[in-house]
Amino acid sequence: MERIDGVVGNVHADDELAALRDEHRENGTLERVVIDAADRRRSRFRATTDAGTDVGVVLDRPAVSVGDVLLVEDERMVLVAFEPREALAVELPEATPATLEAAVELGHRVGNQHWDLTVEDGVVYVPLAADRHIVERVVDDVVPGAEIEATTVEADLFVPDRRDGEAGHGHDDHDHAHPHGGHDHDHHSHGHDHDHGN
């Protein structure tokens, strides 16, 4: 087992690390540690990267975040990812003054509930931090006629500091989801705890 002490930085906050992450991805030397809900708030945990490397992680803080870099070397990089999240994908009706007003109201209502919300390629994603029927009722109340579908997305989709197009245009690394194939991102985060206790 390889011991890793501390976090180097985060690819969502550091352009240099983001560039290194892209290089390692292209070279096939990027390793991801997928952290479950139980481990993400621990200061010490063991895990296995997607390349099969056993690591023991000792942090100087009580939690890891999506995009944290645990190790960066010339020959490889080890990056933290979270387990995918259940979410509702909401396809809004054709844009009219009324539906645009409804979309703004939806953002306001979601914000009041302290739920996250992100928009990708014209589709609104709301993680299921509450009971699915509650989220559906809020959406249907504000935007009647919207198409609502349950889906699973990568946790990176709800990282507030993501830069547009940041998570690469390769789809085999699964750093974030593109269930509809788009790469245009807008993000609005209304909660302070992006795990919502999961």
Image (cartoon, helix red, strand yellow):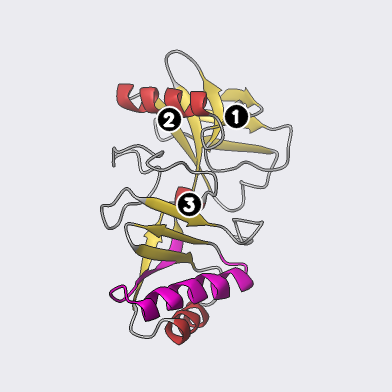
Residue 120 vertical position relative to residue 100 in the rendered view, above or below: above
Instruction: Check the image and name the residue furthest to the left.
Output: 181
- Judging from the image, what secondary structure is the residue with disc 2 in? strand
75, 183: nearer the viewer: 183
Circle 2 Cα neighbour tier, 10 Å, few/some/many (<14 / 14–19 / ≥20): many
Q: Residues within 10 Å of mark 1 (few under 14, many from 20)?
A: some
In the image, what residue type sits under mark 1? Gly
Label 1 SS = strand
Callout 3 environment at 10 Å: few (<14), some (14 to 19), or many (20+)?
many
Residue 48 belongs to the span the image colors magenta: no
Image coordinates of residue 149 in percent, x first then y, are 34, 73
| Position in image of residue 120 (x %, y %) | 37, 56
Q: Amino acid at mark 2?
A: Glu
Please name the residue shown 63% across and 73% down the image.
112
> Residue 123 in the image: x percent, y percent?
35, 64
Task: Kindly identify which numbered label has been placed on residue 31.
Answer: 2
Res 165 seen here: yes
Labelled disc at residue 155:
3
Q: Which residues are magenta?
A: 86-115
Task: Provide the residue designation for mark 1.
Answer: 9
Residue lying at 28% horizontally and 52% vertically, measured from the top left: 182
Left or right of 94 in this view: 8: right
For discs 1 and 2, the disc positioned in front in the rendered view: 1
Q: Residue furthest front?
A: 97
- Mark pair 3, 1: CA separation: 18 Å
Establish if 86 lies above or below 6.
below
Label 3 SS: helix
Q: Earlier in the sequence, mark 3 or mark 1?
A: 1
Q: Which mark is residue 154?
A: none
